Image: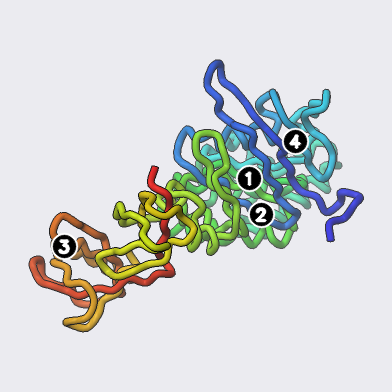
Amino acid sequence: MPDPSGKDAGLDLIGVSHRYGARLAVDNVSLKVARGEILGLLGPSGCGKSTTLRLAAGLEDLQQGEVRIGGEVMAGAGRAVPTEQRHVGMVFQDHALFPHLSVADNIAFGLGRLPAGERRGRAEYWAGRLGLAAHIDSYPHRLSGGEQQRVALARAMAPEPRVMLLDEPFSSLDSRLRDQIRDETVEVLKQAGTATLLVTHDPEEAMRMGDRIAIMQAGRIEQIDTPDKVYAAPATPFVARFLSETNEIALKVTGGRVETPFGILPARHLAEGSNALLMFRPEALQERETGAGLALRVERATALGAYRRLEVSSGALRFAARLPAGPLPAAGSTLHFGLNPDFCFIFPAA
């Protein structure tokens, strides 16, 4: 049960809206991030996710709604607590390290209230925690991109913030290093029990790091849930498309179901005779024995490491399929496919 004292509370945004002139950048957003939880705020560029983070941090003046940290009102209801008093840590794509300060001094930058010895001790602790002990007296220009990112994280964690705000912090790193730094960051945040809001446009990053994901479009939250539920049961076509490639077929509801080229699927949640949109992910197409399922012509086959991506067609219909790694079929060959209903979604046609 939640602690009524608010000690277990993390970050709460309640009915938050924000305009830039005539443009509504954030539209009535409400979300909660509990202590020890990582919430991935995911969406395309310009959807309002970074503005939402800046409102939480106090970097933008709140126009409507309320921001609470640790159960305490930070903005709204006639109150506006400055950023430096909100006990938040922030890490951005630009590491923003001070080039004239050592790693130790960069980490200790926000610890001015502590005695010098304690500042150094806190810096050494976080440098060791993030694999930077050997670089404690080095300067940023001597560090790799991954090491600079670790320094930025250590600096944000050193003041022991109640909330961590991460805005596209890993996008400048190469893919292998990015995965390593992501995993290290999750471990550090979990051990510290910090409520974390991660802003990203990368679905894999949000699903890899987030306990829950909030999908944002045009200033609004379309869905908040665990990564597996958002992927397996998207609330809208936008959510389905944003998380991965989709195949789509326009259909009509008859007798509480739709007839697809692969067979019948139930659609009792839609009105009889209405137009429907069937969406399914590439992995929903599963190869069958010759003579079973729907015969599809291979237009293109590509090896992508752990899986193969095929473009297949039947008349005017063209689909993407994702199959386990194996030999690539020749272009022009025929394969037979069935459809896994667990990866199919049927929405009302727009």
Q: Which residue is mark 2?
A: 127
Closest to the camera, between mark 3 and mark 1, is 3
- Identify the secondary structure beneath mark 2: helix
Q: Nearer the viewer, mark 3 or mark 4?
A: 3
Q: Where's the N terminus, which quadrant? A: bottom right
Cα distance in 3D space between marks 3 and 4: 53 Å
The residue type indicated by label 4 comes to Val
In the rendered image, residue 138, in percent from the top left (x then y), is placed at 59, 46
Residue for badge 4: 67
Q: Residue furthest right?
A: 5
Q: Quadrant of residue 253?
A: bottom left
Outermost residue on the top side: it is 21
Counting residues from the start of the chain, the first of labels 4 and 1 encountered is 4
Return the mark for residue 314. Answer: 3
Q: Percent position (x, y) of residue 265? A: 38, 67
Instruction: Quickly name the residue at label 1.
Output: 103
Q: Position of residue 348 (x, y in %)?
A: 42, 49
Pointers 2 and 1 in contact (C-beta within 8 Å): yes
Q: Nearer the viewer, mark 2 or mark 3?
A: 3
Q: Residue at x 75, y 35 (%)?
A: 67
Who's the residue at 52% across and 43% down the image? 168
As measured in the structure, the alpha-carbon distance from the residue carrying label 4 to the one carrying label 1 is 33 Å
Element type at marker 4? Answer: strand
Dot placed on the residue nearer the N-terminal end, 2 or 1: 1
**Number of marks in the image?**
4
Most foreground residue, 277 or 78: 277
Contact (CB < 8 A) between labels 3 and 4? no
| Residue 245 visible in image | no
Q: Which mark is residue 19?
A: none
Badge 4 crowding class, 10 Å Cα cut-off, few under 14, some 14 to 19, many 20 or more, is many
